Amino acid sequence: MTTTSLSAQPVLSARRRWTVLAVCALSMFLVGLDTTIVNVGLPVIGQGLGADTRSLEWVVDAYTVVLASLLIAAGALADRFGRRRVFRCGLVVFGIASLACALAPSLGFLVAARAVQGLGASMLSPVALAIVVNAMPDPRERARAIGVWASVFGLSMAAGPVTGGALIEAFGWRSVFWINGPIIAAALVLVAVFVPESRGQRARRLDLPGQVLLTLAVSLSVAVLIEGPRIGWTSPLAMTGYALIVATTAAFVRVELRHREPLMDLALFRRPLFAGSVLGAVAVFVALNVSLLLTTFYLQHARGWTPLQAGMVTLPMALGATLCAPWSGALVGRLGPRRPLLLAAGFTTAGGLCMVNLAQDTSVLVLLLAYLLIGIGFGFANAPLTSTAVSGLPPSRAGVAGAITSAARQVGAAVGIAIAGGLVAEVSPTGLAHASRPGWLLVAACGVFLFLVARVSRPVTDRN
């Protein structure tokens, strides 16, 4: 008997399967943590390196843009050269880039190092999911495992501000990168001991034109969002940016439809379940990152709080994600994705609405309630979105589907940072609360969109 892997491999024992999941989850926790841990330290980094708010957005988005752009290609490389091998390579690149970030002498150097970090992370996220899918032959067990995997990733995103605030308060902003060292070392040892090697039965060719066009389309879109307020949304430079985005996106679609082995299987988007899960992933991560960045600048600039205090206020968000993420995974495995998606939609919408009248002196209790609601919504969202993306697909397409969903999360993170930064850049501390109100409306709108995603979802046992 063999697993559902694309390559023949003996079935692992139950303990070994769940150990493999734990090892992959540890690595994914690191990837998710580095997506948000830097947010709370942006004001301090700006002071240390002499950077303004708009420049600081690139510290976060250089990571997320590269990560989003290269996720799918990394999955193809793993199928060709071995998933464990690529996974270990990603850990090494991520660790070296983290060291470079910790030693960065200037903002430009830090942004470049963050981009290399994103390169390393791109070799972890889709490969981790492929390893987990490969190790779990039973569909129900696989659904539970994917739920756990997605839950851990979601928890890491929510825990980032608290962890970052504590580290910055105790050791300075560079410590948020130093902390990666021991985790990387432990992960490398565990992967070598417990994770089996696997490959695709037929390795896909690399779609270099598609990869270049996808990277250009994502990078241009984020660049226009970040720089739009400075250059003017109707300026000739902005208009040129819009035209380039349309042109590169159209060229990407054309190349993918004609390529024998495209980077992104656009046929998957004909499935309402898959398309809904991808758009839902974008919405969830837009909401999370808008919330985190607006919170960071509001609390530290408008109210004068320290990074630790700002991080501690988001503890309810981490608590909500911690409690509800595993619960969501269990619900997906037992009942399917619709119920946890409805819960995610309701709580996210309520959390955004709590903040739409944010003022300079808004009660801390209101802030805590909003962050708790958003954290609960985030905790419930990730497992059903990931499970919905891969449910009903053969194993040969599950890895690509998972990679597209992971890329969608990072696109959402990059867009969320760009939008939130555009709202508060060059705004005086006294005007931050009012300037951030449209961002909280956007958070609520993302929650409403999840109701639509829930409508097209169905139990994972109802397969195509």
Image: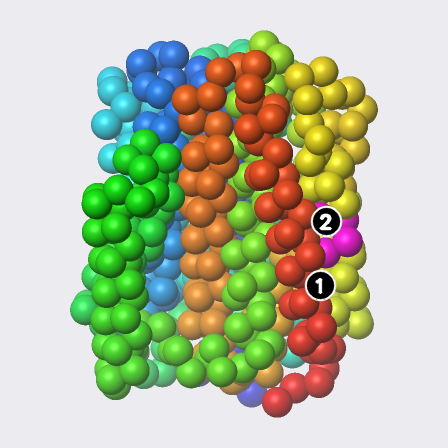
Which of the 4 quarters of the picture holds residue 353? top right
User: Which residue is pictured at 61% across the width and 24% down the height?
Assistant: 433
* Badge 1 element: helix
Q: Which mark is residue 451?
A: 1
Q: Is residue 423 left or right of residue 319?
A: left
Residue type beneath disc 2: Thr
Asked if disc 2 and disc 1 are in contact, CB closer than 8 Å, the reply is yes
Image point (36%, 12%), residue name: 48
Disc 2 designates what residue?
349
Tell me, for residue 99, which label it has, or none: none
| Above or below, 235 relative to 168 | below
* Position of 214 relative to 375 (above/below): below
Q: Say which quadrant the C terminus sits in.
A: bottom right
Q: How many marks?
A: 2
Q: Is residue 52 magenta?
A: no
Residue 183 in sight from this viewpoint: no
Work out whether mark 2 precedes mark 1 in sequence or the reverse, and give the earlier one: 2
Question: What kind of element bears circle 2?
Answer: helix
Instruction: Assign the N terminus to one quadrant of the image.
Output: bottom right
Residue 181 place in picture, x, y as percent: 41, 31
Left or right: 92 with respect to 414?
Answer: left
**What residue range appears in magenta?**
345-349
Question: In the figure, is residue 296 to the left or right of 425?
Answer: right
- Tell me where residue 311 sits by quadrant: top right
The three-letter code of the residue at mark 1 reads: Phe
Q: Residue at x 47, y 77 (%)?
A: 269
Seen from this angle, which residue lies furthest left? 209
Q: Relative to 343, does residue 368 appear above or below in the rendering?
A: above
